């Protein structure tokens, strides 16, 4: 996002560039540029997304230098675990100690953690997750933009407000030029990674989306994620060749029965095959599911994390299911924000090095959860870059947080939060 930090290329090997940030070396994949040592670049999502002139880089780095170390200090201070005198059961303490020391958390242990109800234990879980995040990934925070370009969908998922059979919402499609204008606005405001999302809308043919991706890549230094649902292998191959590098595709639930109940006409195996295939093609995978679907158990939720992990996932996207009044699940209860934060914390202990999102849905059920999520293991979130006039129509659920906020205001709020928490709105790639 705004003021991503430029870095200096200090080594190049097998498609990767090693980039130096104020003495910290990080690796980023380089698919797009002809780089030499000494070049200055921006990296996002583990990818080099832009080459910049030395002059621009140095002036930006000068502006960053002090803040870079100051933010780290704040993050370090907020990532302390111990609270002397706090009473925590030995079982929970033992598991959290293990996680704190970098050992993997098993399914059974994860379940113990997800079952926590005691306030002190919960607090320790959240702080341990935050500390693991800090130790493994430092204070880097990923802020992607999302453009929801069409709310037409051929699917009829029971949980979703833009399902085919919801006749009460007005449908919209953004023309490619409108999408490009939104991309330009976002890039001008500093975004370095954007998700293009829609319902499963075949109005946008392979050629249309390919043309769009090609144009974006040509005109803007930005990492492109597609979130358009299941398409055939040829589609995704062409998108990769056109320069898209990420796919956001949730498997929604690792429980096959829930999956097929929720998504009539869709197959769980197809979903899993898609994700495996996309991962093999070289896409960064962003995936996850819904928390609080009918029939979902805590075991299912743990399994969700392990399933996501099995695809070599880059970004974990799990958010509460929020019933929409015009769907068959309108009377379903929403999971509490507390449960959702516990889930984020447990996910962090299972995948110490993953990017874990705080979703807008979580912020919607309880304002302030973005902050708490970031303090409990999460290290990324998205801002809505869709033109305000369309946002409300992309009504997967009602009352979405930030729906009427101009992008500039969203950015200001996000930056204030990141500063407060000592996070750098950048993505320093993999170390
Ligand atoms: N066509 C794309 C995007 C689908 S919409 C795809 O298939 O991946 C994006 C996400 O919104 C879905 O993956 C789903 O998890 C989430 N979503 C849908 N309805 C929701 C609801 N009622 N509450 C919370 N999230 C919801």
Image: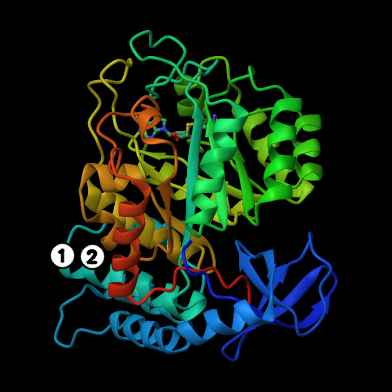
Quarter of the figure with residue 414: bottom left
SS class of the residue under badge 2?
Answer: helix
At which x and y percent is residue 252? Answer: 48, 35
Which quarter of the rendering shows the C terminus?
bottom right
Mark linked to residue 119: 1
| Colour logic | rainbow
Q: Which mark is residue 122?
A: 2
Residue located farthest toward the front when viewing the structure as drawn: 55
How many discs mark residues in the rendered view? 2
Mark 2 and 1 residues: CB-CB less than 8 Å, in contact?
yes
Residue closest to the eye, 428 or 95? 428
Please determine whether, in this image, residue 226 is positioned above or below residue 219.
above
Task: Quadrant for residue 236, please give it.
Answer: top right
C-alpha gap between disc 2 and disc 1: 5 Å
Q: Residues within 10 Å of mark 1 (few under 14, many from 20)?
A: few
Is 14 above or below relative to 173? below
Would you say residue 375 is visible in this rendering? no
Q: Which residue shows up at 38% across the image and 44% down it? A: 319
């Amino acid at each position: 996002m705004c003021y991503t930090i430029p870095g200096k290329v200090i080594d190049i090997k097998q498609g990767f560039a090693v980039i130096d940030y104020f003495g910290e070396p990080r690796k980023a994949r380089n698919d797009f540029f002809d780089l030499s040592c000494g070049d200055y670049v921006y990296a996002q999502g583990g990818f080099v997304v832009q080459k910049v002139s030395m002059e621009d880089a140095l002036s930006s780095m000068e502006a960053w230098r002090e803040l870079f170390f100051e933010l780290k200090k704040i993050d370090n201070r907020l990532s302390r675990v111990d609270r002397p005198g706090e009473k925590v059961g030995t079982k929970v303490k033992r598991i959290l100690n293990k996680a704190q020391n970098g050992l993997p958390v098993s399914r059974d242990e994860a379940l113990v953690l997800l079952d926590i109800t005691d306030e002190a234990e919960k607090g320790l879980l959240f702080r341990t997750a935050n500390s693991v995040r800090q130790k493994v990934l430092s204070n880097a925070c990923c802020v992607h933009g999302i453009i929801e370009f069409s709310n037409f969908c051929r699917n009829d998922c029971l949980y979703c407000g833009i399902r085919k059979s919801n006749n009460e919402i007005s449908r919209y499609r953004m023309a490619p030029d409108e999408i490009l204008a939104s991309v330009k606005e976002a890039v001008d405001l500093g975004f370095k990674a954007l998700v293009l999302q829609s319902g499963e809308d075949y109005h946008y043919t392979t050629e249309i989306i390919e043309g769009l991706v090609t144009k974006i890549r040509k005109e803007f230094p930005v990492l492109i994620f597609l979130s358009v649902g299941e398409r055939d292998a040829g589609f995704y191959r062409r998108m990769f060749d056109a320069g898209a590098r990420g796919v956001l595709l949730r498997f929604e639930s690792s429980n096959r029965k829930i999956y097929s109940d929720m998504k009539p006409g869709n197959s769980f195996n197809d979903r899993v095959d898609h994700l495996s295939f996309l991962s093999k093609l070289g896409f960064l995978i962003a995936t996850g599911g819904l928390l609080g679907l009918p029939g979902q158990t805590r075991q299912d939720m743990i399994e969700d994390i392990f399933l996501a992990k099995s695809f070599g996932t880059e970004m974990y996207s799990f958010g509460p299911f929020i019933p929409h009044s015009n769907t068959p699940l309108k009377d379903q209860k929403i999971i509490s924000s507390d449960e959702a934060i516990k889930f984020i914390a447990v996910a962090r202990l299972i995948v110490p090095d993953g990017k874990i999102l705080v979703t807008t849905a979580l912020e919607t059920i309880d304002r302030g959860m973005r902050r708490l999520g970031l303090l409990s293991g999460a290290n990324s979130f998205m801002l809505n870059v869709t033109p305000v006039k369309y946002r409300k129509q992309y009504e997967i659920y009602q009352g979405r947080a930030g729906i009427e906020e101009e992008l500039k205001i969203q950015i200001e709020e996000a930056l204030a939060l990141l500063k407060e928490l000592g996070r750098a709105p950048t993505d320093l790639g993999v170390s």
